[in-house]
Amino acid sequence: MAYGLLALCAAPFWVLEGGIAHPLYTLVIGAGMFAPTIASVVVAKLVDRTSWRDAVGLRFRGKWKRILLWAPLAALIMFAINLATAVIMVLRGVPGDLTGSTWAAEVSRAMAENGAEMPTAAAVALILAVTFLGMLLTVVPALGEEIGWRGWLWRELKPLGALPAIVLGGAIWSLWHLPITLIGHNYTGEPRWAAVAMFIPACIALNYLFVAITERAGGNPIPSAFAHSVLNSTLGLTLSVVATSDTVASLNWFVDTPLGLIGIVLTAAVAGAIMPRHARPDTGLPGAAAGHGDGEHAPAAPTAGG
């Protein structure tokens, strides 16, 4: 159901002029991000006949402190990963400016060309404020994904063991993106078959991180939605901050981005570091979770909706 609903949302952009550059693309795909939540509601209510809020972890009693702590922490962690990926890109030899002065000057120049001339510091502050506002707005569609993937699916896959659950959950999440990956979303200009293949390990690493955040929040997926939103909202910004006119032509999208090899390694390392110690099973996966972050025990076998 989740796959089908996103495919329906993406279908028009396979034929509309501009594809992912079409003015309506972001809005329509943003709506499609609620597909996993819709699917979880239907399965919980009509198949498992259980409480949907319990099934996806949307409970708050006794968890408020953890949720309020980990929502901003998750956002900061994801921003740090994005920024660190960009910095490592420059350190490995891709042309760039780690001082950010080239980017700041370009921002100021672009503002002036559009009739909004202002001091460089003010122009940079405005861009950062707009980015922050965008992050807050995109938390909502990000939660549409997180409720389904980190809320419902993670709980359903846990009985398989942490390592299989994280890998399988990440692969399922990655392939859910196929309708938009195949028309150019992610890995700009790269062959689509390679983009699909690369996105699988990227999503497995991100699934590991978002699962760790969810476990830290007592099984509630709201903090992971903040991390997800920051990933989407600041990926381009963090690359731009260190970029020069030669950066884009020289970077390797499969290596130098948060969805490339550098980002995958950083994301997996951070996920292993923050996964709750009490939730680590004997699977050989650093920090992987076996039980719910709130101390609940996973069922012995998947429910009927699994």
Image (spheres, rainbow, N blue to C red):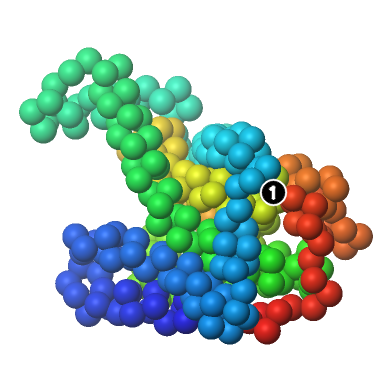
In the image, residue 267 sits, relative to residue 189, either above or below, namely above
**Residue behind mark 1:** 218
Q: Quadrant of residue 101?
A: top left
| Residue furthest out toward the right | 282
Q: Is residue 131 left or right of residue 267?
A: left
Q: Nearer the viewer, residue 43 or 141?
A: 43
Residue at 41 percent across and 25 percent down: it is 100
Q: Nearer the viewer, residue 225 or 60?
A: 60
Q: How many marks?
A: 1
- Left or right of 167, for residue 37: left
* Quadrant occupied by the C terminus: bottom right
Please give left or right for residue 60 compared with residue 128 in the image.
right
The relative height of residue 76 versus residue 24 in the rendered view (above or below) is: above
Q: Residue at x 33, y 80 (%)?
A: 8
Q: Residues within 10 Å of mark 1 (few under 14, many from 20)?
A: many
Look at the numbered disc 1 and give the secondary structure of its residue.
loop
Is any atom of residue 42 visible in this view? Answer: yes
Residue 80, position as x, y percentages in the image: 56, 35
Whether residue 239 appears in this view of the structure is: no
x%, y% of residue 275?
75, 47
Where residue 67 sits in the image (x, y, percent)? Answer: 60, 41
**Residue in the picture at 71% in, 71% down:** 157
Residue at left 21%, top 63%?
24
Q: Nearer the viewer, residue 303 or 121?
A: 303
Amino acid tagged 1: Gly
- x%, y% of residue 168? 68, 72
Residue 84, compared with residue 227, is above or below; it is above
Q: Quadrant of residue 223?
A: top right
